[in-house]
Amino acid sequence: MEMAGAHVPRHGMRIAVIWAILTAVSVPLIVFVLGPHVPPGRMSSEAIAQKDANVVLTAIMAPILLLIWVFFAYSLIVFRQRGDVIEDGPPLKGHAPTQTLWVVATTVIVLALAIWGSYALLVSDHGAGGGQGPDPVALPKGHENALPIQVIGQQWDWTFRYPTYGDFESTDVVLPDHVLVVFHVTSLDVTHSFWAYELGVKADAVPGVDNIAYVTPRRVGTFEVRCSELCGLWHGHMAKKGRVVSSADFQTWVTQEQKAEAPSSKVLPPFNRAYFPDPLRRAG
Amino acid sequence: MSTGVPGRPSVWRGLIGFNLLTALVLGAGGWFLGTWIGDRIAVGNDYLLGTDQNDVAIFLGYFFAVLGWLIGLGFLNYPLSRLAGHPASLRQHESGGWGRYFRACTDHKVVGIQYFFGVGLFFFIGGLNAMLMRTQLLRPVEHAWPAGQYLTLVSLHGTMMIMMTSALIVGPFGNYLVPLMIGARRMAFPRVEALTFWLTPAAGLVLMSAVFFGGIPTGWTGYAPLANQARGGMDAYIFAFILVAISLTLIGINLLATILTMRAPGLTWSRLPIFVWGILSTSVLMALSAPVLIAAMLMEMMDRTANTSFYLASAGGSPYLYENLFWFFGHPEVYILALPGFGIVLEMLPVFTRKPLWGYKLAVAGMLGVTLLSFMVWQHHLFVSGMNASLRPFYMLTTELISIPTGFIFLIAMGTLWRARIRFTVPMLFALAFFFNFLIGGLSGVFLSDVPSDVSTHGSYFVMAHFHYTIMGGLVFAFFGGVYYWLPKMMGVTLNETMAKIHFWMMFVFFNLTFFPLFILGLLDMPRRVSTYAPHLQALNDFVSVSAFLLGFSMLVFIANLVYSLVIARIPAAENPWQSRSLEWQLPTPVPVENFERTPVITSGPYEYGVPGAPSVVDLTPGAVAPAGS
């Protein structure tokens, strides 16, 4: 990373050495010490994919950040004007090899990031928990048999419909562990965004749209549900806790809910991938 | 509105005529006329009367108010005198004195000062909104403001800041400096230039009037159908954004025409100051993206008044239409904010390193590359929206590509610092802070461009921290650098250096202490724009709030410095206090009304520091040697 080639190698070498030492210390710290604690954690395959992406990107960004910071700090200390007399520096107008190296290096990094990101998105992480719209392109293995859960956003609450269990609608979201789940996210009024934080799922709830996101939970526990798209007055209150439970517990919960929700199931509109109520209920 | 005693000149006489006071009076009259017409139209119309506020009346009120405002400022005088058969004149007659700062004035230097104070005032109001928001966030439960008022604060802060910071550098410095830097006497369209400024305070006042009609619940993005559902405050948002978009489009066209056609002889493209390159690329973005915002806003206006359904899914429209149109403007918009900042800091680096700008052509390529790519990235705001899932790799690629030309700017800075003679003046400190902050802002953007990572950070405080690092940490720091750098030329006074350094260090430290923790809050699942949050995040939020208050206090230090230096101390500035080579510093202070007595001839590049035998940058009195205006 020398900047000015042969005639003053000393500064460049010093900067390179400081940078190399800091990089050698910081990258392992990021990967091995910080890495395991990086959000959103390890609750689902998708959350792990996001966590890994966050760790890898931090590990790549750190050396770039350090290179520029070290260069700046070194220059500000060593190349500062001494005394009060204003004198001109050397009239350097550019250095073609350095410029070419920079352009090539940044292009290689960027293309590698884009290829890696696309591979992760489409192939290895099948959508990485993000909403893919009504026609998903990144399909996980066995997606035909995924357990569908419809997420319905409305001002200002989430409800969840389970179409394979008699279309009952619950205010709780419960997922069986180690089962591929497909969320069908939609809205009855304005745009919301369904964010299951520890599960690593985020999908906008758009009126008239069936926004599909896949997730495979990997461990039992609770997760936070948030709304991450401004939806009006009580946007911050669209928060609740979801649960991932064992398959047996899930069956028990479903049976209970079916019984408890039976009266409401009778009057609900038939299950649909999108609903079209009148949106012009002007907020008072 | 006293007329004074006839025959004796009175101070009150100055208040009569086409000026700000008349504009306010006619604007208020226009408002009542418009709402009266709107109420007549609504009679018998179920759609309009079915809601508790008549949106047609509000829109017509704003329309006639702005019409009255512009008539009061005298914008119809020239067209009407032409219609009456009077001859065309290049510029209208202007008197000197304080009065011209309160009128439509076609002197680009006056417009620059008007922008500085006008935009600065609204910028300060936007900042106060942020202080009020951080007060609410001191506790995780609703305590300071009701939820609706908090949302209105969020929306006013965001919208005001986006509207005003769009012109924060282009307005004061673009208008004031571009003609000086290119050796022109004026802008290409001086009356349009006056109009672009006077639309801005109109937009600010219209936006703030939203509080009288139920506030704005949508944030600065104004997503439909939430906007369709909102009360009359939304009309203020729509109308203000239309005014700003018209202003941005016009200023873009004006600056483009000026830079393309009015450069002095000898000012070749490779001698053009890098700040002018920054303004040129910004102007392209403004002229091409702002009209799309007007279209988006007009459709929203139709949905709210004429019973159309562009954005209503239940009636055949699509919320995605709005999201696409908005971000097709919205993403170039963030580069409208960034590019002038690049221009300012790269302009100052050679002066304070006493070296030529290293890699000038690469810097230009970087700016033009950003300009081109910024039109191809907008759907990265919509990665989880459920539209076009198959296009996500494309937008991931284009978004990451844009970091290549942005990276050029850092390489240029590093090359210019290399073996330099760095002077730590106040403008230089701001320029260096720009690079510190913008690097964090830019690199955090890479996380948002990568879809798997974006799924975990989209819509959270992480995004908020990211764009505050680029806009506040970038643009606003560059702006203050420009203020300390150019104000001695623009206003002829020296700013107090001790207060300036206090301002800088407070702003730099508390900016970082305010916004860096927001990255962590975002990763810890705090969504944007919430007035209540999970209790375990309170400690971090309190830390942020206190830092934010101190950041706000640093702005008061700046204002105190401005008042002290401009009003009390009034120490005259040296003609060229920074020993800069640039053209604008070769002119006398104050700069004469027509800038140049004769058309100057540019004889050298502006950054030839230390180049043996480099001639002065300009020949201000070319005399018989070079024919003027050739």
Image (spheres, helix red, strand yellow):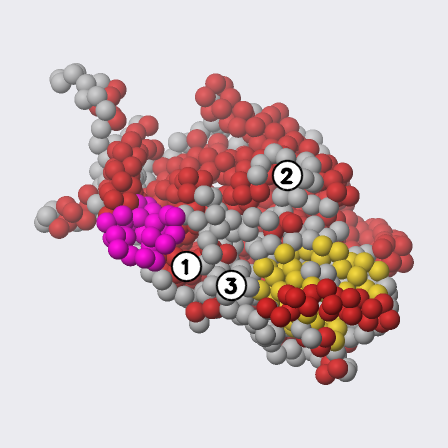
Q: Position of residue B487 (x, y in %)?
A: 48, 34
Which residue is under mark 3?
A: B323
Residue type, mark 2 in image: Glu
Q: Residue at x 45, y 40 (%)?
A: B211
> Do the residues indicated by labels 1 and 3 lie within the same chain of the protein?
yes
Q: Select label 2 or label 1 by which is in front.
A: 2
Q: Chain of mark 3?
A: B
Q: Is residue B487 above or below residue A28?
A: above
- Indicate yes or no whether the magenta region holds residue A33: no
Which residue is under mark 2?
A: B142
Q: Assign the magenta stretch its main secondary structure.
A: helix
Q: Secondary structure at mark 3?
A: helix
Alpha-carbon distance for marks 2 and 1?
A: 31 Å
Give the residues drawn in magenta, as a range.
Answer: B38-64
Q: Is residue B102 above or below residue A14?
A: above
Q: Is residue B8 above or below residue B56?
A: above
Q: Position of residue B498 (x, y in %)?
A: 62, 25
Q: Chain of mark 2?
A: B
Q: Residue at x 65, y 50 (%)?
A: A237
Q: Position of residue B306 (x, y in %)?
A: 33, 60
Q: Circle 2: is it few (<14), some (14-19), or many (20+) Cα within 10 Å? A: some
Occupied quadrant, residue A35: bottom right
Q: Residue at x 33, y 55 (%)?
A: B48
- Work out which quarter of the rendered image holds the N terminus of chain A and state it: bottom right
Residue B300 numbered tag: 1
- Indicate yes or no whether the magenta region holds residue B47: yes
